[in-house]
Image: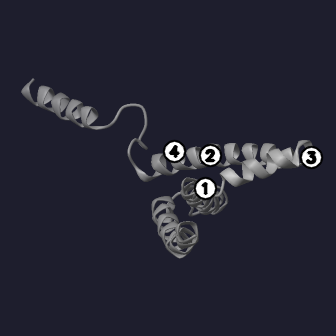
């Protein structure tokens, strides 16, 4: 009976150390999923605002010029940097998702591909952000 109890405790200990609900909790798969959704929603809202403010030119050119004038601030420059960061991550991660879906070894290498996406994102942003921010804060 003691062996059976010990076996049960070991199994229960193993079960309790696993996160409940999903195996992705806190791992690369979950973070890529969350970041992909967040960046997608952010890009959607940017496009919505962009279409609306561009449509102002037909309604009132003065109102359009006023809105565009408010975009030429350092805060909006930082927002543009965040927008580019979102677009770049979303694009690279979209390629990763396509590879997972259509490449027979995609699932096997999904974690590695996540870190490749992060690396490419960092390299791209290191090339973009300093130059853009110099233009934003240099004027």
The percent position of residue 47, horizontal first and vertical second, equals: 73, 48
Rate crowding at label 4 as few (under 14), some (14 to 19) or many (20 or more) other CA atoms within 10 Å.
Answer: few
The residues tagged by marks 2 and 3 sit, at their Cα atoms, a distance apart of 26 Å
Name the residue beneath numbered marker 2.
Answer: 42
Q: Reading the chain from its start, which is encountered first: label 2 or label 4? A: 4
**Of labels 2 and 3, the one closer to you:** 3
> Label 3 vs label 4: CA separation?
38 Å
**Mark 4, secondary structure of its residue:** helix
Which mark sits nearer the N-terminus, 1 or 2? 2
Which of the numbered marks, if any, corresponds to residue 58?
A: 3
State the SS at label 1. Answer: helix
- Label 3 sits on a secondary structure element that is helix
Q: Disc 1 designates what residue?
A: 83
For the residues marked 1 and 4, what is the alpha-carbon distance in whole angstroms?
17 Å
Vertical order, 105 against 41 (above or below): below
Real-space Cα distance between discs 2 and 4? 12 Å
Contact (Cβ within 8 Å) of mark 2 with mark 4: no
Left or right, 49 with reference to 55 = left
The residue drawn where x is 75% and y is 48% is 66
Q: Which of marks 2 and 4 is in front?
A: 2
Does residue 23 sit above or below 79 in this rendering?
A: above
The quadrant in which the N terminus is found is top left
Asked whether the residues under the numbered discs 3 and 1 touch, taking CB atoms below 8 Å apart as contact, a structural biologist would say no
Mark 3–mark 4 CB contact (< 8 Å): no
């Amino acid at each position: 009976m003691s062996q059976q109890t010990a076996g049960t405790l070991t199994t229960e200990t193993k079960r309790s150390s696993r996160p409940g609900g999903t195996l992705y909790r806190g791992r690369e798969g979950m973070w890529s999923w969350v970041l992909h959704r967040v960046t997608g929603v952010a890009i959607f809202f940017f496009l919505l605002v962009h279409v609306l403010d561009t449509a102002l030119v037909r309604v009132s050119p003065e109102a359009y010029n006023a809105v565009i004038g408010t975009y030429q601030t350092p805060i909006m420059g930082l927002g543009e940097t965040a927008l580019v960061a979102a677009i770049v991550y979303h694009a690279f991660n979209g390629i990763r998702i396509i590879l997972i879906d259509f490449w027979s070894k995609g699932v096997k290498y999904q974690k590695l591909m996540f870190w490749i996406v992060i690396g490419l994102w960092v390299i791209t942003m290191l090339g973009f952000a300093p130059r853009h921010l110099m233009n934003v804060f240099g004027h």
